[in-house]
Image (tube, rainbow, N blue to C red):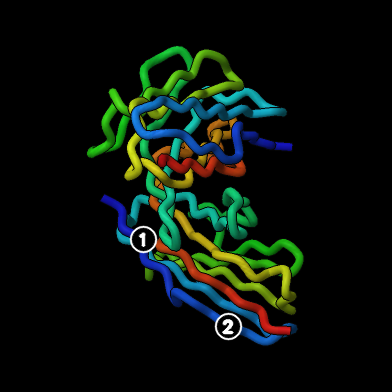
Amino acid sequence: GENVEQHPSTLSVQEGDSAVIKCTYSDSASNYFPWYKQELGKGPQLIIDIRSNVGEKKDQRIAVTLNKTAKHFSLHITETQPEDSAVYFCAATTDNYGQNFVFGPGTRLSVLP
Amino acid sequence: GAVVSQHPSWVICKSGTSVKIECRSLDFQATTMFWYRQFPKQSLMLMATSNEGSKATYEQGVEKDKFLINHASLTLSTLTVTSAHPEDSSFYICSARLPGGGGEQYFGPGTRLTVT
C-alpha cells in the first residue's frame, strides 16, 4: 500500500523567511496530494492541493510542487508569519473519490517573531 | 463553503458508559464521511469510512462493535464509542468528502474524549 514520508518533523524559521516541507510517496498511482494545516486542539484545514496532471500550484504565499518521476511533493510558504505556526500534514491518495488518504507524520512549523 | 461541524467539542465520561459524537456537513451534502483518531503529537489514523445509507467500512484493527457508525442522512454521521475505557481517550476527527469526484476532504474541528 501507499506510504508517505514527511520531512522535516520540526522546522523553525524567522518571521519573513520561507519554509519548505517535503513529502515522498511510494505508490506511483497516487494522483491527489492535499496539504493540511492543524492548529493546536483543532481539526486539520485544507490549505492547498495538487493533482497528478499539474506540476505546480500557487495560492498567495503558499505553493505546492509535484515531481511525479521522483514521487515527491513539497509545500512552500513564503514571507512566513507567526500565525503560520502549526502542524502541517501532507497526504496522498490513488482514489479520485477522496478515500484512502494516507497522511504523512506531520511537520511542526514554528515561526519566530 | 465546505464547512464541517462536530459536536460535542469535548466530552468527559466515566468508564463503561457510551458516548455519541456527531459530524455534520453544513453547506454541502456528503455521501461519504470519514472518522479519524489522533493521539497527541501523532498523525491522523483512519478508523472507518461512513457511506450514507449503508454500513461503514472499518480499517483493520478497529472494532466495529465498539465504534458504532451511523450515516443516516447526507449531512450527518455519528460515531458512538460504546463501553468506553480510558484507552479510548483521544481526539476524534471527522471529515466529509466534497461531492463531484474531486476527492477533497474537509475536516471537522474534532472532539476531545476523556474517559475517567
With respect to residue A21, does A54 lie above or below? above
Element on which disc 1 rests: strand
Q: Earlier in the sequence, mark 1 or mark 2?
A: 1
Q: Is residue B104 visible?
A: no
Residue drawn at the location 49% of the way across and 69% of the way down: A107
The quadrant of the picture occupied by the C terminus of chain B is: top left
- The amino acid at mark 2 is Ser
| Res A7 → quadrant | bottom left
List x then y, in percent, for residue A41.
59, 54
Q: Nearer the viewer, mark 1 or mark 2?
A: 2
Give the amino acid at mark 1: Val
Of all chains, the one bearing label 1 is A
SS class, disc 2: strand
Do discs 1 and 2 belong to a common subunit? yes
Position in image of residue A111 (x %, y %): 66, 79
Q: CA distance from mark 1 to mark 2?
A: 22 Å
The reply to whether callout 1 and callout 2 are in contact (CB within 8 Å) is no
Q: Residues within 10 Å of mark 2 (few under 14, many from 20)?
A: few
Residue placed under numbered mark 1 in the picture: A4
Q: Is residue B102 visible?
A: yes
